[in-house]
Image (cartoon, rainbow, N blue to C red):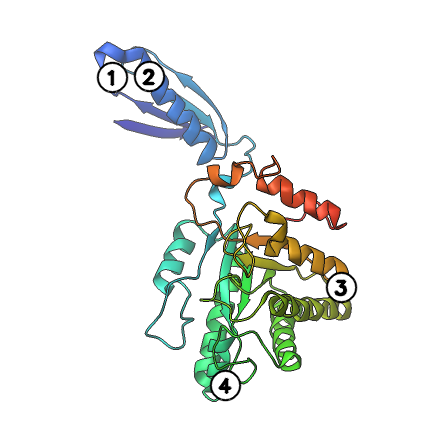
Amino acid sequence: MFKSQITNHKLQISSNIKYPKLQTNEFRILLIGLLVIICNLVLGAWNFSVFAQNADDLEVTIDISSNTTTTPKIFKPNIDLSGRGSSKDNSWPQTLASKESIDKWSLDLGFSGFYRMEYDLWEINKFSKETDTQNKLLSTYEDVIKNINNSKGTVILSLFGTPAGMGKILDKRSSPVDLKAYKALIKKNIKYLSCEKKYNVWYEVWSSPDIGDFFLGNQQEYLNLYRLCAESVKELEAEFKIQIPIGGPSASWWFKNLGSNTVIAPEKSLIYELMKFCRAYHLPLDFISWHGFSSSTKVERELTIYKKDLVSLIREWLTYFNLDKSTP
């Protein structure tokens, strides 16, 4: 049993737990250790002291008037809010997590980290003649972005989908063929979210363009797509005197390209080609992204064929192309 009381700005917690007789000292050390962790993580590292009057009593005093510390990064999770599949409600983005899930996450954890969302331009423009549905759809995107920003979080907005009439074929995955119209559409959306509403948004150009299930086009067509998005950002930055982060390529894995590349030839990857392309055309590349379909962090720490881990290798490429080595 635990009991607590506050006296002179100090919180006192006492317990009369009956410890296992054979491991009394070890158990008490473990309990004290747990209390130390709790005090640091939950209570913000207030000053505290531990006192044991006898073998069965444990008293912890916490000075709640002392200075606290910054919340550890473990409380700033980063997740992808997209990938749900579908929704029966046309006014709710089809790939976005359900409203119930988002509300629950917001209530329990908040949105203080990085949160990725797919911004489906095909889906948005599909309702161009149904203004009520389209406005609700746009409002949903904006509400989630605003919620994340209000929690001091950052949105990575994946610009995805080619509206009907702008692609080579009638498919959301198609590379745009009407580049002028597509650029105007991209610029309009970025202008509203970043320049007018001033949301903290990082724009990611497409999602897994190296996979046919997500992009119907070749590597040069993807690079051209990135160029029109990056040029839109440059023009808006010059007009509104603000910085608008843009990056990519959000490949399915760091060494992938739009061919059949393997980890043996990382210099043929889409990431490498995008760096080279941005350098040649003086385009911004504010962050580099790829998917990691593994639950193990060991995968990304393994050495490449060049005897470097993949992050070190990518930073070496950045230096080679005279780009910022500290690019996230």
In three-dimensional space, the C-alpha distance between marks 2 and 3, rounded to whole angstroms, equals 64 Å
- Between disc 1 and disc 2, whose residue precedes? 1
Q: Is residue 21 above or below residue 84?
A: above
Residue ID at (50%, 45%): 76
Q: Circle 4 — which element? A: loop
- Between disc 3 and disc 4, whose residue precedes? 4
- Of labels 2 and 3, the one closer to you: 3
- Between disc 4 and disc 2, whose residue precedes? 2
> Does residue 102 appear in the picture of this structure?
yes
In three-dimensional space, the C-alpha distance between marks 4 and 2, rounded to whole angstroms, equals 66 Å
Residue type (three-letter) at the residue carrying disc 3 = Tyr
The x and y percentages for residue 95 are 41, 67
Q: Circle 2 — which element? A: helix
Q: Which mark is residue 28?
A: 2
Confirm or deny contact between disc 1 and disc 2 (CB under 8 A).
yes
Image check: 301 left or right of 95? right
Q: Nearer the viewer, residue 109 or 296?
A: 296
The x and y percentages for residue 71 are 52, 39
Q: Circle 3 — which element? A: helix
Disc 1 target residue: 19
